[in-house]
Image (spheres, rainbow, N blue to C red):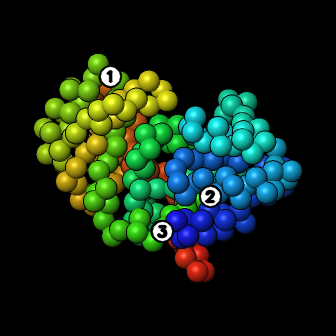
């Protein structure tokens, strides 16, 4: 699948325009995009990064990492996903960067999602849904999710987000109304962010292949 990821990442370069500040996500597919972006770094003003991991890779290529507060509205955000349904709704957060990813997606005019074919599903939920929580609220949020009977939350022990929070992964889901579930989970006190990108889905999805497919 690494070749499919590379092809998707390199295809996304076509959406980069001169003088842009580019929003950059996190993950193995995005790493290929960052490497491709480095080849045209002279054309862009810099990048806003969703994780420390991506920031390190960007800086290693000599690409300036700009704070979102200093960048304003971004014309483009490129990121991967753990799952993508036919409506371009996504599950993200396998790399525990979901909150910053969601913030940058909201701040962007165009969200281009790059995936390999294995990430395409008809119904979201095969991949456990990440939920970032304030540490003191971990058990409270888990009990609330259980009471909703939507799935089984499991604490991702040993993982702390870049924001200093913890992650619950909700297993056993079949998410037929991702917008409604995103809204309901966001109402639980202690939830920082939900790895459903449904209220603000991707605008474009690039599926890696020879040639890549643009949805």
Secondary element under disc 3, as helix, strand or loop, is loop
Q: Residue at x 16, y 32 (%)?
A: 143
Residue ID for mark 1 = 135
Tell me: 56 left or right of 17.
left
Q: Tell me the quarter of the picture where residue 208 sits.
A: bottom right
Marks 2 and 3, how far apart at CA: 12 Å
In the rendered image, the vertical position of residue 197 relative to residue 142, given as above or below: below
Marks 3 and 1, how far apart at CA: 35 Å
Counting residues from the start of the chain, the first of labels 2 and 1 encountered is 2
Q: Residues within 10 Å of mark 1 (few under 14, many from 20)?
A: some
Residue ID for mark 2 = 32
Tell me: 145 left or right of 31.
left
In the rendered image, the vertical position of residue 108 relative to residue 83, given as above or below: above
Q: Which numbered marker is on residue 1?
A: 3
Where residue 78 appears, as percent x and y from the top left, is: 61, 54
Marks 2 and 1, how far apart at CA: 33 Å
Foreground residue among 93 and 5 = 5
* Tag 3 and tag 1, C-beta contact below 8 Å: no
Any part of residue 100 in sight: yes
Q: Which numbered marker is on residue 43?
A: none
Residue found farthest to the top: 136
């Amino acid at each position: 699948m690494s070749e499919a990821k590379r092809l998707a990442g390199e295809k996304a370069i076509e959406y980069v325009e001169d003088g842009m500040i580019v929003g950059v996500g996190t993950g193995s597919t995005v790493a290929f995009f960052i490497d491709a972006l480095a080849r045209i770094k002279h054309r862009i003003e810099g990048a806003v990064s969703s994780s420390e991991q991506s920031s390190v890779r960007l800086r290693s290529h000599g690409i300036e990492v700009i704070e979102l507060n200093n960048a304003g509205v971004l014309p483009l955000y490129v990121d991967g996903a753990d799952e993508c349904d036919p409506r371009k709704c996504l599950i993200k957060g396998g790399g525990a960067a979901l909150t910053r990813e969601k913030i940058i997606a909201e701040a962007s005019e165009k969200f281009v999602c790059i995936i390999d074919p294995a990430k395409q599903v008809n119904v979201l939920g095969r991949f456990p849904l990440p939920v970032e929580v304030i540490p003191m609220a971990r058990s409270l949020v888990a009990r609330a999710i259980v009471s909703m009977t939507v799935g089984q939350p499991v604490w991702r022990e040993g993982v702390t987000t870049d924001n200093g929070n913890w992650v619950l992964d909700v297993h056993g889901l079949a998410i037929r109304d991702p917008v409604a579930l995103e809204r309901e989970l966001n109402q639980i006190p202690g939830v920082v962010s939900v790895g459903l990108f449904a209220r603000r889905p991707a605008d474009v999805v690039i599926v890696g292949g020879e040639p890549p497919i643009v949805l």
